[in-house]
Image: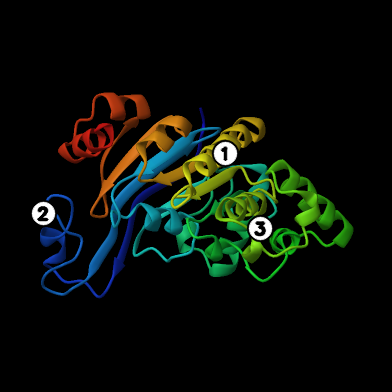
Amino acid sequence: MDVLLRAHGLTKRFGEGCPSCLDETGARVGTNRCPRCGAVWAVRDASVELRREEAVGIVGESGSGKSTLVRLLHFDLRATAGWLEAARIPALEPIPDLYPKGSDWTRDLLSMDGFRQRRARDLCMGIVYQHPHLGLRMGVSSGGNIAERLLSAGWRSIGAMRGRAGGLLERTEIPLSRMDEPPKVFSGGMQQRVQIAKALSGDPPILLLDEVTTGLDLSVQARVLDLVRSLRDELRLSMLVVSHDLGVVNLLCQRTLVMKNGEVVESGLTDQILQDPQHPYTQLLVSSQLQ
């Protein structure tokens, strides 16, 4: 499979940092907070590759940096260091001067201005957050939430946007009769499905999922996961899936990254990670969920 998105050395530090940070933070010493200056290294020197039509899982305990990593890729947060490139794909062709002459890779997306980053994000990525209020305007109709995303992708016809919103809501199992209701009156599972519909509205090749089943009842989790899996196969999506649940990653993902204290401590095929973990932390994760 061809690589669609690649990042190297992604780092996000909260705080000024000091010379001691490199030695006194990280998975090796068991903390991502520097005891001298107090800086938090939410992500440190992480590298990611996402191939076409591939799903990659990112697992780890709370505070391991997995959600921060996804938000760096989505430009929700500005990286402290690292670079990010996308392959030549039709979705990004409308952005002028994005690809250097003769290159099949974009310029470093992290070094670009905010306008180009937002444009690239709107054209090639969709995201579903753990907390629906981060991805939805709770007081705006479900159809209006999707229309907002379509406007940012260049749509202008109200009729076309309404038709697109209705089709996506039906596909994600939201009754068309509820399209004009705001997400605040929906259940948690329905709110997540509205988020999925919004994320897919511009036909992005990449979908980012950040703990989409956390806090949902088991039966609702199963319906959301079945929906995601069917959409992945039907739309031939590339996905990054953040979860603390190894069962979710096993169901959806071909490859997996394991994070601890801001660092990727192990990566490989999902089957390999779950059946023969090499890093002591991965072994602990796997054994704790098997008990």
Secondary structure of the residue carrying tag 3 is loop
First in sequence: mark 2 vs mark 1: 2
First in sequence: mark 1 vs mark 3: 3
Q: Nearer the viewer, mark 2 or mark 1?
A: 1
Give the camera-side residue of 92 and 107.
92
First in sequence: mark 3 vs mark 2: 2
What residue is pinned by disc 3?
Answer: 96
Q: What is the number of callouts on the image? A: 3
Q: Are marks 2 and 1 in contact (CB under 8 Å)?
A: no
* Residue type, mark 3 in image: Pro
- Tell me: 154 left or right of 42: right
Secondary structure of the residue carrying tag 1 is helix
Q: Nearer the viewer, mark 3 or mark 2?
A: 2
Q: Residue at x 54, y 60 (%)?
A: 132
What residue is pinned by disc 1?
Answer: 223
Q: CA distance from mark 1 to mark 3?
A: 41 Å
What residue is pinned by disc 2?
Answer: 29
Q: Residue at x 76, y 56 (%)?
A: 178
